[in-house]
Amino acid sequence: MAKIFEHILVPHNGTIESNKAYKKAIAMASSINAKITIFTCLERRSIFTLFKKKTKNEELNGEKKIVENQHKEMINYAKQHGVTASSKIERGDYASEKILEFAQQHKIDLIVLSKKKFSSHSEKFHYHSTVEAVSKNSDCAILIIN
């Protein structure tokens, strides 16, 4: 019997919501013997989105070191749960484009995203652009965690 999901991509931005999605992905990967890639996009543009963003190279380099440490902790967490995990940090203009590009290049079977609950209409309008762009344009399955 073939596995449905062999490689799971988890976009991560260090928030409580993305940590929740990661833990759900670990639980799933552990039960189906899938591998996980943690993915963070350091966005160069200063738009309001879910994923990390910085405009200056010094800020991006500082942010990258913080993210590298987060990813190391997450990989250790995966090992504790018997899951093979790797990580990728990329710079780009839009997180959604980088997520989709990575998923296509690495034959990702499932992308696990998190949704943050916002209170204002403006936040809801801007936030959903990344999640919606990924869910509308992905060739693989998407799991959105609330």
Image: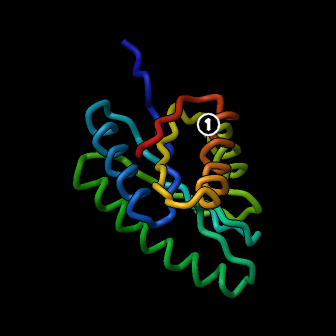
- Structural crowding at the residue carrying mark 1, measured as other residues with C-alpha within 10 Å and reported as few (<14), some (14–19) or many (≥20): some
> What is the residue that sits farthest to the left in this orientation?
80
Point out residue 125 in the picture as x, y percentages from the top left corner.
Answer: 65, 53
As displayed, is residue 25 above or below residue 58?
A: above
Please name the residue shown 23% across and 49% down the image: 81
As displayed, is residue 2 above or below residue 33?
A: above
> How many numbered marks are there?
1
In the image, 91 versus 43, the foreground residue is: 43
> What is the residue that sits farthest to the bottom in this orientation?
58
Which corner quadrant holds the N terminus?
Answer: top left
Point out residue 57 in the picture as x, y percentages from the top left corner.
Answer: 73, 82
Q: Is residue 119 left or right of residue 77?
A: right
Please name the residue shown 64% across and 42% down the image: 132
Point out residue 10 in the picture as x, y percentages from the top left corner.
Answer: 48, 49
In the image, 129 versus 139, the foreground residue is: 129
In the image, 77 versus 93, the foreground residue is: 93
As displayed, is residue 145 above or below residue 126?
A: above
- Quarter where residue 36 is shown: top left
* Mark 1, residue position: 135
Q: Is residue 134 left or right of residue 118?
A: right
Mark 1 lies on a secondary structure that is helix
Q: Is residue 113 left or right of residue 27?
A: right
Q: Amino acid at mark 1?
A: Ser
Please name the residue shown 67% across and 37% down the image: 104
Please name the residue shown 61% across and 49% down the image: 128
- Quarter where residue 62 is shown: bottom right
Q: Is residue 128 left or right of residue 24?
A: right
